[in-house]
C-alpha cells in the first residue's frame, strides 16, 4: 500500500492524498477543492459519504452519498466511498465533479 503523502493546500492546511489509516477515511487534494470520505448510519444501514470543500475560508461542504443497498457495515460503506473518491479525476473551480472516465455529475 502506498504511504500517504503530506500536502499543503493554498491556505497552508495539511491534506493527504491516500489513506490516512485503517480507521479513518481517505483525503484527496484537487487544485480548487479538498475531498474526504466518511460514513453515516441511515436507519438500519450505512451510507458512504464523499465530502468536498473549496479551498477558501468559510466555504460550505458539499456531500455526495455512496449508497450500497442493505449495507449494514460502516467500514464497507466508507470503503465504497474511498473507491468512488479514487475515481474522481477533478472537482472544478465551480464544484463540478469529473470522474476518471470523463463523466461529469450534474449539479
Image: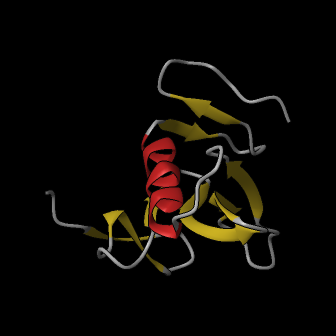
Colour mapping: secondary structure
Residue 11, position as x, y percentages in the image:
57, 77
Q: Position of residue 58 (x, y in %)?
A: 81, 78
Q: Residue at x 82, y 29 (%)?
A: 106
Say how many tags the image has: 0
Q: Is residue 107 left or right of residue 52?
A: right
Residue 93 vs 53, above or below: the answer is above
Asked if residue 96 lies left or right of residue 37, the reply is right
Of the pair 22 and 56, the residue shown nearer to us: 22
> Residue 16's image quarter?
bottom left
Quadrant into which the N terminus falls? bottom left
Which is nearer the eye, 73 or 24?
Answer: 73
Report which quarter residue 53 is drawn in.
bottom right
Residue farthest to the right? 107
Q: Quadrant of the C terminus?
A: top right
Q: Residue at x 50, y 81 (%)?
A: 13
Residue 43 screen position, x and y as percent: 79, 68
Quarter of the view holding residue 59 = bottom right
Give the image location of residue 47, x and y in percent.
Answer: 66, 58
* Camera-side residue of 107 and 10: 107
Taking depth in this image into account, of 70 and 13 the one nearest to the observer is 70
Horizontally, residue 46 falls left or right of residue 12, namely: right
Q: In the displayed structure, would residue 18 be above or below residue 92?
A: below
Amino acid at each position: 500500500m502506498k504511504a500517504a503523502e503530506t500536502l499543503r493546500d493554498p491556505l497552508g492546511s495539511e491534506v493527504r492524498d491516500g489513506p490516512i489509516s485503517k480507521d479513518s477515511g481517505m483525503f484527496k487534494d484537487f487544485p480548487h477543492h479538498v475531498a474526504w470520505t466518511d460514513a453515516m448510519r441511515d436507519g438500519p444501514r450505512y451510507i458512504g459519504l464523499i465530502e468536498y470543500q473549496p479551498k477558501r475560508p468559510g466555504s460550505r461542504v458539499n456531500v455526495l452519498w455512496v449508497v450500497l443497498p442493505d449495507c449494514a457495515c460502516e467500514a464497507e460503506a466508507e470503503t465504497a466511498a474511498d473507491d468512488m473518491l479514487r475515481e474522481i479525476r477533478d472537482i472544478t473551480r465551480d464544484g463540478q465533479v469529473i470522474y476518471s472516465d470523463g463523466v461529469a455529475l450534474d449539479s
